[in-house]
Amino acid sequence: MSDITIKGAQIWDGVSETRYPGTVTISGNKITAIHKGEVAPADTSSEVIDGTGHTLMPGMVEGHCHPSFTGINDPWELGQLSPEDHMLQTAGNLRLLLSHGFTSIFEAASAKPLLGVVARDAINSGLLDGPRMRAASPEVTTTAGLGDERKRHIYQESFGLIADGALEMRRTARECVRDGVDNLKINISGDEFVSFAKAEVTPLEDDELAAFVSVAKTYGKTVAAHARSSESVKMAVRHGVDCIYHCDFADEEALDMLEEAKDRVILGPAFGLVHNATKEGDAAVAEELNLYRKFEATCAVYHEVRKRGLRVAVGGDYGFAITPMGQNARDIEHFVRYFGYSPVEALRCATTVGAELMQMEDQIGQVKEGFLADLLLVKGDVTQDVSLVQHQENLSMIMKDGVMFKDPRSGINAGGLIRAAE
């Protein structure tokens, strides 16, 4: 394949405060040259793409991704899907995510063991179109914790693997390691839709979390945690969890602990679900589940998180009926509208911070010489209006690893355009 040169675009490199005019050349799967300025050097050996009127930016990273969540209303519905059907639907979601400009995803949990691992390997081998991904375990939980949908009279699968006590936690974590996961996910707190374990309840015990994290560290795995209660956030920090999701009800002590650990911890509010449930869902249900209170608490926490300089990744629990897959880029605008981020700060959360979460900060998340060619051409100035990336028609080019998924010269995705709710 010949080199590709993109000229005429304004470059937002993932780091700078503003865009700048320039020309970018891609050879193979790498960015090999960046020439700043309006006038590009002549190169007759490259195929040229005219990016006039566009922002050239890094591909986005979804930091709280559930590709195996299939538009469900209730968690137990995931247990009704056969593994075969579930895998096919997961593959469709992965292709959908790439078609919306997400060239990398950090899986926050797989709905069944091996779904994420199989998908990751199929993408890496070229069998499936999708973002590069770090594959996760299911959400490990306790009896009467988030993800335990069993009843006395019915055995019901959901998205959780249930383990009680330190010994079972070790065994379950080791089984997931044996499966080949990159990330281990554990639920420390409950959630508002769990009648027996609300968001401010912390079912997990210290010895259980310690055992789980110990296994992860032994095998070099990343630990992500569901932590809405203040105590669950403190437990996550004390035990060395790498990525802490939600943190809605973190108190001052929890925020201080997070700030002390900011060089090793990345947060993710997963705000999309809270937003859609309160702004676009049934108001009576939202009131019954205390979601308006959660909404306000999350906004207050992340205003403070931003002031303290903590790293935060985008990704909003998409994959439920109320948060359709494909809306994922909405989170960037949520950071601006509700958390006080500037547009560029929010974009960094979707690029450079996401690259750190992927543990690929030296390869992705920036338009930089030597980095992988994960690139988007977005119509307009996304550094002023982050909502532009929410709409597929604004994504003129989607390139992952130097390969065109959507080519601006043809205007269609490789294999056909995929539409999703926006």
Image (cartoon, grey):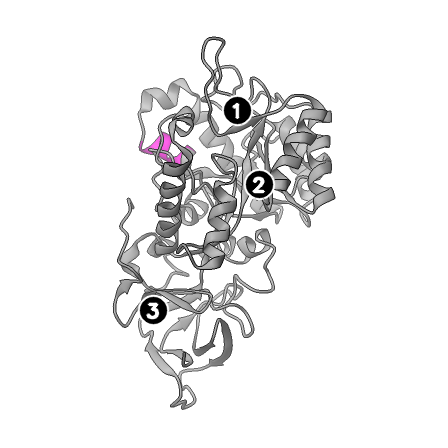
Q: Is residue 278 magenta?
A: yes
- In the rendered image of this protein, does residue 348 appear above or below residue 257? below
State the residue position of label 1: 146
Give the residues in magenta: 274-280
**Residue farthest along the front direction in this orientation:** 84
- Label whose residue precedes the other's in the sequence (2 or 1): 1
Q: CA distance from mark 2 to mark 1?
A: 27 Å
Q: Residue type at mark 3: give it.
A: His
SS at badge 1: loop
Classed neighbour count for the residue bearing mark 3: other residues with Cα under 10 Å, few (<14), some (14–19), many (≥20): many
Mark identifier at residue 54: 3
Vertical arrangement, residue 413 with respect to residue 262, above or below = below
Q: Is residue 314 left or right of residue 203?
A: left
Secondary element type, mark 3 = strand
* Residue 65 in the image, given as x and y percentages of width and height: 47, 43
Return the residue nearer the eye: 420 or 52: 420
**C-alpha distance separating marks 1 and 3:** 44 Å
Task: Note whether residue 384 is visible.
Answer: yes
Q: Which residue is mark 2?
A: 304
**Pointer 1 or 3: first along the chain:** 3
Q: Indicate the position of residue 164 as horizontal and vertical percent values.
A: 65, 21
Instruction: Specify whether residue 192 is painted magenta.
Output: no
Closer to the camera in the image, 50 or 182: 182
Q: Are marks 1 and 3 in contact (CB under 8 Å)?
A: no
